[in-house]
Image (tube, rainbow, N blue to C red):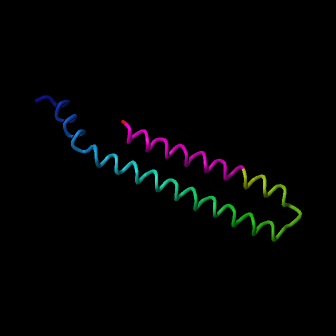
Amino acid sequence: MSLLSIVLQAAVDYTPFAQMGAGIGAGISAVGAGIGIGQIGRSAVESIARQPEAVGDIRSNMIIAAALIEGVAFFAIVVSFLLVLM
């Protein structure tokens, strides 16, 4: 048997585990994004409470950071689903 056929057979045998791992990865990325956005919101509220005059700057920075975290989370979820479908 050639090395390629052995590797392909091993890949077929582990397909259910790869799909399960991709699903777990999607869940972990969603939970991580939720925790990160919660931390941003908490810090923004504390900052606004300390310096009410800087509310505009704090709010805009918070929205940008939350959007970046959401983008990374969506990327991780899409990659996980692509692994499941392939």
Question: Among all residues in the image, which is located at the extreme front?
Answer: 85
**Residue 24: quadrant of the picture:** bottom left
**Quarter holding the C terminus?**
top left
Q: Residue at x 82, y 55 (%)?
A: 57
Q: Is residue 79 left or right of residue 44?
A: left
Give the vertical position of 65 relative to 47 (above or below): above
Point out the stretch of residues depicted in magenta: 64-85
Whether 71 is among the magenta residues is: yes
Q: Residue at x 78, y 56 (%)?
A: 59
Viewer-closest of 49 and 15: 15
Residue 72 % position (x, y): 57, 46
**Quarter holding the N terminus?**
top left
Q: Is residue 42 left or right of residue 55?
A: left
Q: Is residue 25 left or right of residue 16?
A: right
Residue 68 % position (x, y): 64, 47
Question: What secondary structure predominates along the stretch shown in magenta?
Answer: helix
Q: Residue at x 49, y 42 (%)?
A: 78
